Amino acid sequence: VAVTLSDVARKSGVSVGTVSRVLNGKMVSPIPADTIARIRRAAEDLHYRPNPLARALVTGKSQTLGLFSRELTDPHFLQMLEAVESKARELGYHLIVSSSLEGVSRKGRVDGTIVLGEPHCFAEESIPGRQPAIYVFHSEAIEQDMVAWSDEEGMCLATTHLLEQGHKHVIALFCYGEEKATVSYPKVQGFRRALANSNATVRECWEAPCPNQYSQSQQYENGYRNIRRLLAEGVYFTGIVARNDFIALGALCALREAGVNVPQDVSVVGYTDSIQAACADPPLTSVRTPIAPAGEIAVEQLVRRLDGLRYDFSGVLLPTSLSVRQSTAPAPQRTAL
Amino acid sequence: VAVTLSDVARKSGVSVGTVSRVLNGKMVSPIPADTIARIRRAAEDLHYRPNPLARALVTGKSQTLGLFSRELTDPHFLQMLEAVESKARELGYHLIVSSSLEGVSRKGRVDGTIVLGEPHCFAEESIPGRQPAIYVFHSEAIEQDMVAWSDEEGMCLATTHLLEQGHKHVIALFCYGEEKATVSYPKVQGFRRALANSNATVRECWEAPCPNQYSQSQQYENGYRNIRRLLAEGVYFTGIVARNDFIALGALCALREAGVNVPQDVSVVGYTDSIQAACADPPLTSVRTPIAPAGEIAVEQLVRRLDGLRYDFSGVLLPTSLSVRQSTAPAPQRTAL
DNA sequence: TTGTATGCGTTATCAT
DNA sequence: ATGATAACGCATACAA
């Protein structure tokens, strides 16, 4: 049922080679205008559509990119997806989305992959013979083939925002895994750096284990319980910075339940600037990680490389910023909480 | 650099045909165990991976599904994506995501497509020679190749929920396009049907034009402005049902600004049960459309069809339900608002 | 049982 | 200028 090149060739009275050349505009020597017209006409009449598989087989390029994310519900991924799909389409590439490395690792089905994650999680050792990839993730330094942002900077931004508004009693909601205490270490460092530069009299850093790193509701619960406990313990604070928006949202809930007003009594700032942040009450001030632009850059560079253009991309570090909304305000004068 | 079948054949001292048959488990007659072992071993040593393109070219199946959504930021799409990708992967299919019909319409790159939208937007006329597709969208009747839910039922559910709690003054926030007044007509009907069965003394149905049907922030604005205006006009009401969550969120905001308590003074129920609904304040009661399960069923049926199994799927209508959260409560006794 | 040969739809390299 | 023809890597019908 599928109409092929040879169908067009037969109908237009020329050979497949000629048809291929004409349709691809790759004729080495001038071809009679009427021949070209006849071929185009035939292709049109027959509704000819080149078979992308056959073409990919012979050219070695499938014009398809892979997009990997460990969790498809990850706010980072959601923010990336639209930008990546749009840019890929603009550059003539299709997009295969997968939460399995297997699906998008090997060359053939896809020409290259954009990985939401660290380079080492997609290393050559684990995937022998994998194709080109560009990684989008947080990192503290420029790394090869990586479009990154600094979580240290981001968390410093968040903390500084609070300090600049006069907050001197700040709680940081971090989340350590049992063993790997470095899960979000850059964020811890960013928090501490901001405090070090300030004259804050109290520096409180509260940390609790988090069972499932990827469960959004568990993180919400975590933020909720921690703030609830601090409140119960009578700890005094006017600002909270959270490791991510879900924890911040949980904190918000605990504060509300306790009758603490945000931002009048306590300011809260989240991290990632997910869609959830914007529709919280009050709308959550949150660190905006540049994932959408990162995704676009990743596609651009990857395609440059795949298209054989000069490839001198050695990674880039994009700046984070702060989406200031209504969950933060100047610190209140000290009163009983 | 890529290792092919013939490489494995050479190394194991047999022919490509044999290797192909062994590796695919399609040997018609028993093959010596040691030969099989030798071939498997060689394939392993060489890290042989079949070229999916070549295989697809000869078998005519790319083992890839297309997933189309007009807007990749659509809450419906987001809820579908994870379920669809997961189910597709489980059944051995890859997934190409595209916001362009072109990208996933023609056979070759993809074997079939799941369309988030009505069948007619992907009709045979507009895409001649397109491949099998299954549609996921709202519909009031069972339709061929469609996994649907009833918006009439959903909105009736939402309204009934309010009525059952004693609300007699309900506002419906609908949104008509200028010309096409049928955009969400089933929802209007559902609202009216619920009212018809009740003894509500006041039935208020408020409608306003909405410039861009797909802009989430515009819809939010729309809900905000409409409620703000009703409040200013002194209209009395204790319940609001909105066409979607964004409009409901906007309404929530307007109520809060006006000092109206939700749900004590006014109950609000949204539609779609997006992630935004859950993290609103108060968490929004919302109609849950069964898009995730719909996506799974769509994949299952589509794959059945593609795999040549008996295909007697003529469409299905899935039930909607209500995610009851904290934005709804029994109607207050009539007091000055 | 297993090897050989053909075809899938293109592109690209030759001759002509 | 254009027509054969050889790959591309694989599956498979057919021959041996």
Image: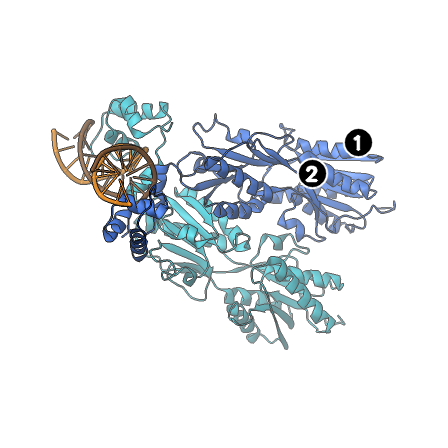
Chain colours: A blue, B cyan, C brown, D orange
The residue closer to the viewer here, A107 or B271, is A107
Number of residues whose C-alpha sits closer than 10 Å to that of mark 1, classed few (under 14), some (14–19) or many (20 or more)? few
Answer with left or right where residue A324 lies relative to residue C11: right
Which residue lies at the image location 52% right of the left edge and 52% below the top edge? B72
Number of residues whose C-alpha sits closer than 10 Å to that of mark 2, classed few (under 14), some (14–19) or many (20 or more)? many
Q: Earlier in the sequence, mark 2 or mark 1?
A: 2
The amino acid marked with disc number 1 is: Ala
| Chain letter of the residue beneath label 1 in the structure image | A
| Chain letter of the residue beneath label 2 in the structure image | A
Q: Secondary structure at mark 2?
A: helix
Which residue lies at the image location 68% right of the left edge and 52% below the top edge? A280
Q: Quadrant of residue A321?
A: top right
Answer with left or right where residue C2 lies relative to residue A290: left
Q: Secondary structure at mark 1?
A: helix
Query: Label for residue A154?
Result: 2
Q: Which residue is mark 1?
A: A196
